[in-house]
Structure formats: C-alpha cells, structure tokens
Amino acid sequence: DQQVKQNSPSLSVQEGRISILNCDYTNSMFDYFLWYKKYPAEGPTFLISISSIKDKNEDGRFTVFLNKSAKHLSLHIVPSQPGDSAVYFCAASAVIGSQGNLIFGKGTKLSVKP
Amino acid sequence: EAGVVQSPRYKIIEKKQPVAFWCNPISGHNTLYWYRQNLGQGPELLIRYENEEAVDDSQLPKDRFSAERLKGVDSTLKIQPAELGDSAVYLCASSLVGTGYYGYTFGSGTRLTVV
C-alpha cells in the first residue's frame, strides 16, 4: 500500500505562471515532508522541506503547504521557469514506523513551456 | 565538497550474471542508503547503514542481493544472479544523521539493464 501518493504523473505549465504539485499521504505518523527534484540521468536533489508543526515553508520561488487534517501537501512554484522542468518527488519521514527513512511518491513530471 | 559518487553509471548484463555497484558517500556522513528506482516509480529503500552496521535491510531481497559497507565509508551492492526484473536505477544516498529530517544527498545512480 502506497503511503505517499502523487496522483498526477505529469503537469504542463506556461512560463511565468504558477505550478502546483500535489501529494497525499496515509501514514499519520509522518512528521517531516520533503520535496526532491530530479533531472534525467541525475540523482534526486533536495528542494524544500516542512515539519509537521508548520503549515507553510517558503524558499524563494518555492513554497510548500501542509494540511495535516487532510493529509495533503503541495508545492507551489511562482513564477515557473523552463529550468524547473523536471520530475518532482514528494517524500515523507517518521521516526516511528519508517525509522526516519524517507518514503517517496511516484513523482510528477513538470514541463514548463516558454 | 565532492558529492555522493557512484560507479558505474550504466551497466548492461545478461540474466543470471552477477553485478556489483559501488558508492562513496560524502565525507563524514555516517548514514548510507541504497535505493532502487523502477521506471515510473519513486525510489524505494533497499538497505540503510549506520556506520558499518546495516540497521534496516527489511526490503533487501536477501536471496540474491547483498551489501557491505567497509570501515563505515564506501559501500558495495551486489546482485547474484541478476533477473530481468532487476532492471532499474540503483541510487546511493548519504546523510549526516540517521533520519530523513535533513534530507539525503543522492548520487547520480547506476542504471542497470538485464537482458
């Protein structure tokens, strides 16, 4: 059973507009959430994270929102740039249950068109 | 500083042959992970080391997969014999502390194709 779900395999956005990537989770023990970005033929790179005690974390053009009651988080990219085109993975961690290991979703491929 | 280094980048082998992947983590990172990423999927943990001890190998198919981490630094992941379903990208990652809270640093991965 997938504990971290990214239900949109792909997303296409125009340059300059907002990109919103969504992630749902089922394990209520998760207490830390991260987003990773992956370019082809490279490993995933850390983008932004949020603790479960917060509902928002912002870093430049990237903002992650967490809705614990809905077990949902989203990544907003504003404004989107062509260089943001990549696969984005949502990941979650819990000290209890997953021993702090990261559990990943399947990823969403973002395409930002000029 | 150098990142997580993996080799080889690509490997093509025939089924039933053995194969090995090597990983050199970031200096000072005591936690090392091996993940497998199948096509269209997210990375899935195979094994996690704290220094030289494997603290979580519950997802490692032990009938054909083995791993070691010599002196708590470099690590090798081996498959013997390989099966067609083992075709995937094998990712190594390291972190300073043994939780996901600070994120992992991943290597570029080894893409294995079993024919």
Image (cartoon, coloured by chain):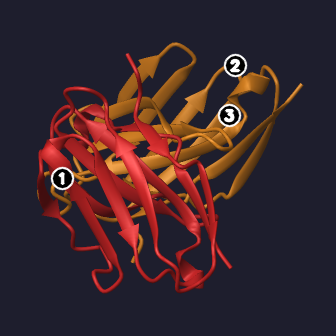
Residue A10 lies left or right of residue B75; in this view the side is right
* For discs 3 and 1, the disc positioned in front in the rendered view: 1
The amino acid type found where label 2 is placed reads: Pro
Name the secondary structure under disc 1: strand
Which residue sits at x=35%, y=56%? B34
Determine whether label 3 and label 2 are within 8 Å by CB. no
On the image, numbered disc 2 is attached to which residue? A79
Q: Quadrant of the C terminus of chain A?
A: top right
* Residues at marks 3 and 1 on the same chain: no
* For discs 1 and 2, the disc positioned in front in the rendered view: 1
**Mark on residue A19?**
3
Relative to A85, residue A107 above or below: below
Q: Nearer the viewer, residue A69 or B25?
A: B25
Q: CA distance from mark 1 to mark 2?
A: 39 Å
Using the rendered view, name the quadrant where residue A46 is placed.
Answer: top left
- Examine the rendering and report whether any part of residue A75 can be seen: yes
- Chain in red, by letter, is B
